Amino acid sequence: MAESLLTVFLKALLLAVALLGAFAYMTLIERRMLGRMQHRIGPNRTGPFGLLQPIADALKSIFKQDIMPSRADKFVFVLAPAISITFALAAFGAIPGGPAGSLFGFDPWVVDLDIGLLYVLAATSMGVYGIFLGGWAANSKYALLGSLRSAAQIISYELGLGLSVLTIVMIAGTLNLREIVELGVWSVSPWLWPGLLVAFATFWISGVAEVNRTPFDLPEAEQEIVAGYLTEYSSIKWALYQMAEYVNMFTAAAFISTLFLGGYKGPAFMNAIIPGSADWPIVWLVAKMAIFMFIFIWLRATLPRLRYDQLMRFGWLYLFEVALGATLLTGAVIAFVL
Amino acid sequence: MATFVVLAAVMVVGALGVVLLRQPIHAALSLVGTLLALAVTYVTLEAHFLAAIQVIVYAGAIMVLFLFVLMLLNVQDAGPRRSLPGLRWAAYAAAVVTATAIALVAFWDGRPAPDPAVVSLHLQGGSAGGIADALFGELLLAFHLVGVLLLTGVVGAVALVQRRAASAHGAPKGFGLPAGRDLPGSGDAAAGKARALGPGGQR
């Protein structure tokens, strides 16, 4: 099933464009939904339903003055947003969008790696450098505090994330995301359901923390440290960070759908309604991602931000232990029951 | 081969940057670049699992901790420091001799390179299975011994910190405590209060 380099390149380009387009409209959807949840209207003036708002925002970002703090480390200051967006886009590449050859004869993924799961974890863990270096290079105390917070947070919650993923890996016996989807982790045995449920919960919580969203958006807690690592950024560099944040949200949503909710596979009863529709590429993955994206926004409108010490204590004293317990439980079930 | 030459060049430049750059953060970043280039080299050798682990563990965790400490302490360039006379030239000479020795061993090694077919058979597609078989089968004892070695390092670090913490506890009583609260056994509360103010309290 080896595809030519040109096909892979074109698919990667298409994916990047799709993700960035989705980012633009995700900002609009988020603002409209937040407006709804807070009894406001939200942006509705630019075009019908405010549909041209993202374009206006993009133009504004591009034409704004690009301010470089005079005492900043200029090279790192420019490098950091580029790191952020590069690894955010790269991480999505290994996530499969459908069965092999289902996308007009092409495979609906960019790369099919035997270690796809580790690849996604590796790419997302590199993304922390963008936040981290951006805050440092700005040479401002608020930015530095923001990046120190984010580094501590991301390292702490990566443990919970990794342990939750371990449950899936033990059940599936593979690191290939496509094979995990094809196997269907819930169908292996009902004995595994308790462990899987707990791992699902811990994975989701860690995922929210990894993408720095409310209630874990400490790195940019505006009441305490202005905008954290973003404080000194303006114009297109600021927009790049926003893109990276949203693309990371997409990746987290797609990753959790792929691992725990059958990824690109549609529900089986859909085959009874429209034959073959459960095997449509992309559609089901996007539908599942949409659910998680909605929950991201919902959380933001609902939950207050954690205090920093609460965040660390929760990560190390509760989440980590619970995820470890789920892993041990699953391991015990596999060893002694199955 | 061309890929390897490019990657090797990136790694050598990165490694030089680690040593030569003045700003500690830049040096650490240079090390990250070197590690990433090494990961890509693993990919070209079909060792995908190793490459991913290299990125996750070294670039994603250890280097982040390095940078974290550097930023937390806000380490700046300390400037040229006095050292033993001739140390610099001795270091240059040692580097040249070591590099020559490694090059000699690498290029004059008489053994034939292993057959790529055999290597890829052992790697099993570069996935986790092959490494697990080696680590938890043939090399189990060595694997456990490395664990003990790491534990030794952790215990050593704790011991180093603990001694300082213990001596801080045993130091003149009351230091660092809130004013007015003294350690038991000290009758002179006023003196304790004066000491509790810290170095300036003696005035």
Image (tube, coloured by chain):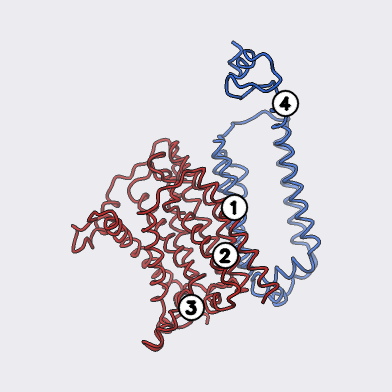
Chain colours: A red, B blue
Residue located 41% across and 44% down the image: A221
Q: Is residue A51 left or right of residue B100?
A: left
Mark 3: secondary structure: loop
Q: Amino acid at mark 3?
A: Ser
Which secondary structure lies at badge 2? helix
Q: In this orientation, which residue lies closer to the viewer: A296 or A19?
A: A296
Q: Nearer the viewer, residue A126 or B108?
A: A126
Name the residue carrying label 3. Answer: A4
Q: Which residue is mark 4?
A: B170
Label 1 and label 3: CA atoms lie apart by 34 Å
Q: CA distance from mark 2 to mark 1?
A: 17 Å
Q: Is residue B164 above or below residue A322?
A: above
Q: Are marks 3 and 2 in contact (CB under 8 Å)?
A: no
Task: Have a look at marks 1 and 3 and say if they share a chain.
Answer: no
- In this rendered view, identify the residue nearer to me: A245 or A196: A196
| Position above or below: B60 against A19 | above
Amino acid type, residue under disc 4 in the picture:
Gly
Residue for badge 1: B61
